Image: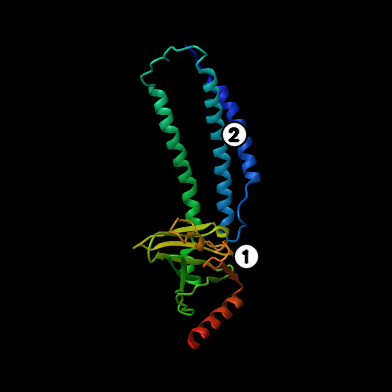
Amino acid sequence: MKSLNVLPLVILGTVMGAIIGVLLVVLRTLPEEASAQARSIDDLYAAFLLFSGIIFGIVVLVMLVAIFRFRARPNDTRDGSNVHGITWLEVVWTVIPFILVAAVAFVSWPLLNENNVSGAAEKSGQRIHITGYQFGWKYTYLNEDIGIKDSQDLVVPVNVPIGFDITTMDVMHSFWVPAWRMQMGATPAQTNYASATPSKIGEFEIVCAFLCGVGHTQMNSAVEGALVTKVKVVSQADFDKWVADTKAKAAAA
C-alpha cells in the first residue's frame, strides 16, 4: 500500500507559503490610511495574510503531491483500499482549525477594543446618528452644540473621535468607509455602533457593503452620478463654519 511522507511536504509548503504570503503583503493594494485605527488594522491584516499564505502553501502542495502519487494508472480498474476512519487524523483536523480560530479571536479582540473610541466620542468628540435607506444615508449630529438633522452630507473634523449610531429605515445596509477601515451593518429594528478617529483632511469614499436592492450601486460614492456623497474631513475651523452655514440655510428655509 502506498504511503505519503507528509513532514517534508509540510516544511516545503511552509517555505513556499511564506514566500507567497510575503508577496501578498508587499503587493497588497489597500486604500489609503485615513484614520487613527487604520494602521493597526492593516498590520493585523498583513499578519493574517502571511499566515494564510503558509496554510495555503501546505494544503495545496500536499494535495497536488497526493493527487499525483495516488492517481489511477491507465487501465487500472481496481478499487481503492476501504478505510473506515483514522481517529488521530480526525482529531488533528478538528483541533488545528479550533486553535487557529481561537488564535485569531485572541489577537483580534484586544485590537478591536483598543480601536473603539465610543467612550472618547461621548465625552469630547462627535456623536452622529446614521440612517440608511434605499438608496442613501442621512446624518443627524447628536451633540447639543451642533444639532443638525437629516443632513445628506457627512462632514467631520479631523483628529476628533466619532461615535456612530447606525440604523435603517427599510432593508439591511452596511456603512463602510474603506479609508477608515470602518464598516458596520445597518439592521432593521436594531441600532448598531461603530467609531473612528479621522486622521487626514480630504474626501473619502462611502460604500454600502450589502446588496440592498436595484439601486445598490447608487450608495457607492465612487460611482459616477451616485446619490451618496463622499465623507468630508476638514479642520475644526472649517467644520465650525460648515455647521454655522448649514444652520443658517435651514433657518432661511
Name the residue rendered at 48%, 51% in the picture: 110
Mark 1 is on which residue type?
Answer: Lys
Q: Which residue is disc 1 drawn over? A: 200
Q: Mark 2, residues whose alpha carbon is within 10 Å: few (<14), some, or many (≥20)? A: many
Query: In the rendered structure, which disc, 1 or 2, sits on the residue that comes first in sequence?
Result: 2
Q: Which residue is disc 2 drawn over? A: 17
Name the residue rendered at 42%, 32% in the picture: 95
Relative horizontal placement of residue 113, taking residue 41 as reference (left or right): left
SS for tag 2?
A: helix
Please tell me which residue lies in front, 98 or 21.
21
The spot of residue 238 in percent (x, y) is 61, 77
Please tell me which residue lies in front, 84 or 111.
84
Please tell me which residue lies in front, 157 or 252.
252
Name the residue rendered at 65%, 40% in the picture: 23
Mark 2 is on which residue type?
Answer: Gly
- The coloring applied to the image is rainbow
Relative horizontal placement of residue 248, taking residue 31 as reference (left or right): left
